[in-house]
Amino acid sequence: MHEVSLSLAERVGPAFSVDGMLLARKKTREAIAEIAARVKPGMVEEDAVQMARRVLLDAGLALSWHPTRVRFGRNTIKPMKLASEPGVILQDNDIFFIDIAPRLDAWEGDGGASFVVGQHAGYARCARDAEALFHEMRGIWKRDRLTGQRLYAEADRIAASMGWELNFDLPGHRVSDFPHATIHTGSLADFDASPSAMRWILEIHIRDPEKRFGAFFEDMLLEDEDYL
């Protein structure tokens, strides 16, 4: 990718605001925590999705540019572009993740995290490792300023060393004032330069090699002083 297209890939729209983007992120992370607190064993996945949408709307957030997702159990291995198996019920010892992309006024939020109910060591480790891998990759990005391509290659290597498979169907993407798709639709994993802060979402989706369960974590790439 040549220099001009790199700069075009990271440009923003007229409503872009540092404070606005950080506030959208804060509201997104708060909504994830609120949704997770309301998810209980015995819930059907579709009901959890409807509940998540209500949480977002009640918080004054707009349902934005991709579907609100809550995925239970065996649906946690699926790429986001594939629909969940219907009717999956959260068990007493289970794993689930949340993936939301709300909009606050002109600014896009996007975030995801995984959670475990009950006692299951494998699920708990997978959820912890998805978040830990995100933070490790953010640290590598900050220290080494790798290209997006090299960042995901390194994530793949580290995930394998942890005993997981990295899902490349979730390769990261732009984030901006809404809608970022009019600016750039390419993935972070294809970006042939070091990504700038507050321009990209780093997505980490790891799966059990036997495809029984997975975990997801995503957040905006930010410098340390903004990552609170």
Image: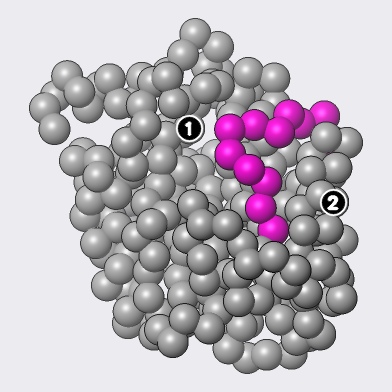
Q: Which mark is residue 175?
A: 1
Q: Is residue 114 left or right of residue 46?
A: left
Q: Position of residue 3 (x, y in %)?
A: 14, 24
Q: Is residue 74 above or below residue 219?
A: below
Q: Main secondary structure of the magenta part?
A: loop
Residue drawn 25% across and 41% down? 191
Extent of the magenta region: 59-70
Q: Secondary structure at mark 2?
A: helix
Q: Is residue 1 left or right of residue 23?
A: left
Q: Position of residue 133 (x, y in %)?
A: 44, 67
Relative depth, front residue between 139 and 8: 8
As measured in the structure, the alpha-carbon distance from the residue carrying label 1 to the one carrying label 2 is: 25 Å
Residue ID for mark 2? 51
Q: Position of residue 43 (x, y in %)?
A: 85, 69
Q: Amino acid at mark 2?
A: Met
> For the residue carrying disc 2, how many other residues have a C-alpha within 10 Å: few (<14), some (14-19), or many (20+)?
some
Q: Is residue 30 left or right of residue 147?
A: right
